[in-house]
Image: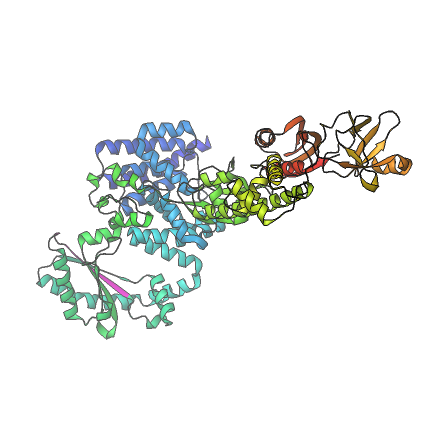
Amino acid sequence: MFWKTSWKKLEQIIDKKFLDLLKSLDKVVTQNEKQLVIKAFNQAKEFYEGKILPDGEPALTHYLEVGRIAVEEIGLRASTLIASLFHGVDFENSDRANEITNTYGHEVAVILNGFRRISDLPTSRLSYQSDQFRKLFLSLVEDIRVVLLKIAHRLCDIRHPEMLDNEKLARFVQEVKYLYIPITHRLGLYTIKAEFEEKVMRFEHPEVFDSIQSKIKADKDNQEAFMKSFIGPIEQELKLHGMDSIIKWRTKSIPSIWAKMRDQNIDFEQVYDLFAMRIIIKSTAKREKEDCWRAYSIVSDLYPPNPKRLRDWITTPKASGYESLHTTVKGLDDRWVEVQIRSDRMDQVAEKGQAAHWLYKDKPEKKDAEEWLNQVRDVLENPGQIQFDAYKRSSSHANDKIFIFTPNGDLKQLPGGSTVLDFAYEVHTQVGSSCSGARVNNRIVPIRHVLQNGDKVEIITNKKQSPKHDWLAFVATERAKSKIRRYLKEEELKEAEFGKELLMRKLKNWKISYSDDIINHLVKYYKTTTSIQLYHDISTEKIDLIELKKHLVALSAEDKSPNAKPAELTNEAGVEAKTPAKAEGKDDYLIIDNSITNVNYKLARCCNPIPGDDVFGFVTINSGITVHRTTCPNAARLRERYSYRFLLVKWRESKDNPVFQAAIRVSGVDTLGLVGEITKLISNDLKVNMRSIAFDTRDGKFVGKIVLQIKDTDHLEQLMHRIGKVQGVEKVVRLD
């Protein structure tokens, strides 16, 4: 009951504020628009019922005050006022959002959506990147009324610092200083800009502010007397010349006085132009420039001007559209006064910022946010003729730049269409090269994901990740493309070095001398542009080494070259077979070949030896000879107990294409499709048969065992080398 009674009392305050606001709309809205505003107000009362601000006032009074600033001090109309009433509503609630959109139209929805979007921007590091943040702030906005509503909102906040805690007040002051003051200046909202500047100074330099303010107040009576005596002769002369005018005066703003004291290193008493006077002439559009210059002539005849202080913004208006004549003249007692002369139209533009409003008079192909603000004019001068599209950024002004937040709140500028990978390379080359994905607005996305303006991006890296050729197909920045190409070139050289070492080993095994003549011949035969490309193709198995050997053997036979000594090759091994035993030289090596069939041997299953391994033969009692790797886990035990059974063994190459069984263990970070990628590489790209495959995943890591059929150790080394380059793979080792 208490809340109902209390709320009814508060409603009276709310209703009165709304009725006062409604009166200011009478001249600028239609009757239908007025009824829609009333409906919005009644609905807003339901939304905010019982919601009280820290000072005890209803929350709706704050939203009404924001609306009042937007209407009365900026000059906006019904749609913005309705949006101001609902900008505290949870617009993420789809039902409520749909209700507001269906009831009050698309305009209101656009303003509310834009307002929410720019309100969510992190501003903690605003001072460090204020220029870029302003560009981001404006680039996110399709309708300029969003910016104006935000200005009204922040002005309302800063006028009531008692409603804010110290932390929030400090943050708002930073926003005003680095964001809203420059924007209001660009928009021509000079009155609001001056108030913002005063609030900032009062917060950041309270002692200086109070000191200057007290000195101004102490001399208030003398100031008024001086200005009356100064203005009197001007008023008389203007009337004599038949000029209808209004004259206002004020002491210059405290921030302006302080800036002059700092810049010129002078005391308050030495600031010669403390006073500013404005002459507003009622004139027609055709005569306003002429009348302003006539008034200037009258003032300069009465008081000597400083020619260095003349500013003609009538002939050449400011970029914001501001028009006025400024001069500084010497009055009584040699005191300087700044005089501003303008028409009543020019004054309205200067006071309410019409000069910065956004009706396009032309449709250029592209303009950035700053240019956009410079192009807009005159909308609020004729509120009855405003169309919704006049407020909107033209679609032709599509953003060709986007601004992305790092996790720390720093901003990175990228071209439109940039991906996660582009952003990663913008952060650091190493971050880009190891990028495996990202969290964008707390959602995991792949490296191809196209970023949107204002996204917050945290890059995910993997030390086993490396640039791929297909990356070049989707990155947008030249920096990323350059870094990827450089890495690929370096990797190509590494692959080439590996291929060269592999070829040299093979040639040695084939008893063929490595020479420049051989390499040059192979370059021509395989039609590679350079030896580096030849080595690279060998490393990546684009060139088959068996075919290469056959070619060199045939070439040696034709030339009767003594360099080539082709050897005979064994039968398929890895299973039990009958093969010969043959002594070679003094060392009594067991030569594994097909020359005789009276000796049984098999390859040990405990270590799976393959051609290229260092091996030994062990004579068993019932199974003939078992061939082991010298690194076999059982080798030490066998040698210690049965050294007399050991045989020296050598591999002899086969004329067939024998395959041998080998097992490898692959481990790394589990990623989607990893197993498929590995098996595709082995089966399709490398043309290697798999006998078995088993993978286990736990806590984001994987371990897999793969049993393969390969030719020799070189073949196995190549295969392991290629598997190790798969994204997510951290380690590849051969198993015994």
In the rendered image of this protein, does residue 244 appear above or below residue 450? below
Q: Report the front residue among 146 and 619.
A: 619
Spot the residue most to the bottom.
Answer: 333
The picture places residue 352, in percent across and down from the top left corner, at: 26, 50
Q: Main secondary structure of the magenta part?
A: strand
Q: Position of residue 404 (x, y in %)?
A: 45, 45
Q: In the figure, is residue 174 to the left or right of 145?
A: right
Q: Quadrant of the C terminus?
A: top right
Q: Closest to the observer: 387 or 242?
A: 387
Which residue range is magenta in the image? 275-285
Residue 359 highlighted magenta (yes or no): no
- On the question of residue 58 being in view, the answer is no
Q: Nearer the viewer, residue 543 or 142?
A: 543
Question: Compared with residue 446, is residue 198 higher up or lower down, i.e. above or below?
Answer: below
In the image, taking residue 154 as reference, residue 394 lies left or right, namely left
- Name the quadrant containing residue 230: bottom left
Image x and y of residue 664, in percent: 69, 33
Q: Residue at x 19, y 43 (%)?
A: 382
Model colouring: rainbow
